[in-house]
Image (tube, helix red, strand yellow):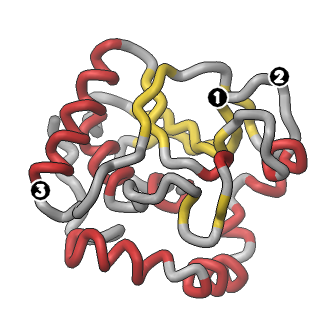
Amino acid sequence: MAHVFDGVPGVVSVVAGYTGGSIAHPSYSQVSSGGTGHAEAVQVQFDPKRIAYPALLHLFWRNVDPLDASGQFCDRGEQYRSEIFYHDSSQMAAAEASERAVVQSGHVRGPIVTQIVPAGPFYAAEAYHQGYYQKHPIAYAIYRWGCGRDRRLHQIWGTDAAAGDGPSTEG
């Protein structure tokens, strides 16, 4: 998901990592093997004067399969679950409102399994995971295509999928 938020005006930083689990400072091998309770996640720091949190939520929804409880695209297991981690009651309310808007949009046909949960400790992934799509653009493109990510997003969201027209930076 780092590629989704990198370069968005108002996004200050995007860090790949792990959250929601039972051990401190997990490694990729621990998380990817399952059983720690962590989810692979991105921590997005943003300037709310330049981009509103609901705009980030719009990007999130259009880049995940909110119907898949077993992972995302080729990545299978609880560590690849779709979740929104909120930091305060305002973010929780915005995330819940965004979920209602997704349901009302009619794009998603089935029960949404994306969870909206309080943020816990976030642990940055190892350096080789940071900016992976930039460091290895061909491997990333092959992975993305091979997993059917864009096809599935288009199936769910139609022309509003992934890149779509992009969100407004207003709330």
At 84% from the left and 51% from the top, the residue drawn is: 33
Question: What secondary structure is found at the residue carrying circle 1?
Answer: loop
Query: Mark 1 touching mark 2, by CB under 8 A?
Result: no
At 38% from the left and 57% from the top, the residue drawn is: 67
Q: Which mark is residue 105?
A: 3
Dot 2 amino acid type: Ala
Q: Which residue is mark 1?
A: 20
Residue 32 percent location from the top left of the image: 80, 51
**Quadrant of the rendered image containing residue 141:** bottom right
For residue 39, side relative to residue 29 (left or right): left
Q: Residue furthest top?
A: 89
Residue 65 percent location from the top left of the image: 41, 61
Query: Mark 3 touching mark 1, by CB under 8 A?
Result: no
Q: Which mark is residue 24?
A: 2
Q: Nearer the viewer, mark 2 or mark 3?
A: 3
CA–CA distance in space, label 1 to label 2: 10 Å
